[in-house]
């Protein structure tokens, strides 16, 4: 089985799950996001966001391929590029952290260590760029796939709560920790990245 992790660009954006290609939950503020969905311009807004972040900050995602078949992705960026992050009661994120926006692994490819490889690849990328941590807003009442990661799964893979909230706690993972995760965490990682988002229910707007 050949697997590759490729930086996300406009060229491979079509390889994301269909609804993710046009999802602007994180990329726009709530009002602008709703307007983009209603006007049918969310795909263009997504492309514009990726283009701007790539030009201004650099790589903001990875796409996972197994035998040239796209099977998952992860999206991340500093909170300054994630307007929706300011809408949460537990914001702002720490200045030394990058936000883990969303992630996904196709169900048929879970349990193969892809989650661990993907997160470690992101960690190495961000460490080289001078960041110390990944933070995410968890959903403590998660019931079905959506753009927010389940808080319990974030905790299961090593995140620690840095600001509590009954619904949207903010959690943090030290990047150096991800590089030394043991194999017994692999299954939890795959559960995190696979259970969070499944076609077609990928955005709550």
Image (cartoon, rainbow, N blue to C red):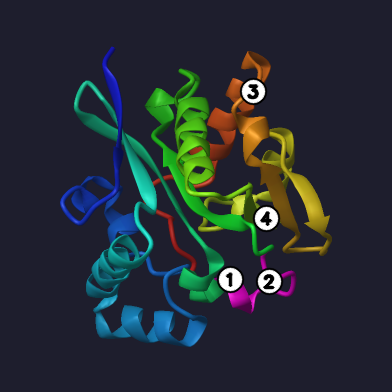
Q: Residues within 10 Å of mark 2 (few under 14, many from 20)?
A: few
Judge whether 8 appears above or below 105 on screen.
below
Q: Is residue 128 left or right of residue 49?
A: right
Instruction: Label 1, secondary structure: give it.
Output: helix
Which residue corresponds to mark 2?
92
Q: CA distance from mark 4 to mark 2?
A: 14 Å
Residue 205 visible in rendering = no
Query: Residue at 41% across / 85% down in the picture?
Result: 32
Q: Is residue 191 left or right of residue 66?
A: right
Start and end of the magenta stretch?
Answer: 85-93
Instruction: Label 3, secondary structure: give it.
Output: loop
Q: In x, y percent, where is residue 80?
A: 52, 72
Q: Residues within 10 Å of mark 1 (few under 14, many from 20)?
A: many
Q: Nearer the viewer, mark 4 or mark 2?
A: 2
Tell me whether the residue at label 4 lies in contact with that at label 3, contact meaning CB atoms closer than 8 angstroms. no
Residue 26 visible in rendering = yes
Q: Quadrant of the N terminus?
A: top left
- Using the rendered view, name the quadrant where residue 163 is placed: bottom right
Q: CA distance from mark 2 to mark 3?
A: 28 Å
Q: In x, y percent, where is residue 27?
A: 42, 70
Q: Earlier in the sequence, mark 4 or mark 2?
A: 2
Q: Is residue 122 left or right of residue 47?
A: right
The one of 83 and 179 positioned closer to us in this rendering: 179
- Using the rendered view, name the quadrant where residue 118 is placed: top left
Q: Earlier in the sequence, mark 2 or mark 1?
A: 1
Which residue corresponds to mark 1?
85
Q: Nearer the viewer, mark 4 or mark 1?
A: 1
Query: Residue at 53% across / 38% down in the picture?
Result: 123
Q: Nearer the viewer, mark 4 or mark 3?
A: 3
Which residue corresponds to mark 4?
138
């Amino acid at each position: 089985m050949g697997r590759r992790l490729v930086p996300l660009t406009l060229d491979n954006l079509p390889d994301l799950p269909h609804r993710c290609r046009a999802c602007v939950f994180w990329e726009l503020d709530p009002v602008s996001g709703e307007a983009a969905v209603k006007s049918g311009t969310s795909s263009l807004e997504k492309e514009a966001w990726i283009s701007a972040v790539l030009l201004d900050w650099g790589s903001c995602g990875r796409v996972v391929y197994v035998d040239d078949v796209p099977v998952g992705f992860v999206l991340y960026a500093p909170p300054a590029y994630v307007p929706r992050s300011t809408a949460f009661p537990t914001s702002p994120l720490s200045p030394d952290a990058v936000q883990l926006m969303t992630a996904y692994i196709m169900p048929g490819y879970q349990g193969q260590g892809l989650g661990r490889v993907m997160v470690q690849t992101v960690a190495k990328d961000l460490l080289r760029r001078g960041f110390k941590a990944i933070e995410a807003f968890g959903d403590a009442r998660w019931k079905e796939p959506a753009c927010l990661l389940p808080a319990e799964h974030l905790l299961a893979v090593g995140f620690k709560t840095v600001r509590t909230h009954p619904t949207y706690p903010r959690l943090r993972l030290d990047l150096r920790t991800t590089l030394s995760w043991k194999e017994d965490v692999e299954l939890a990682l795959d559960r995190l990245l696979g259970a969070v988002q499944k076609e077609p229910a990928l955005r709550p707007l």
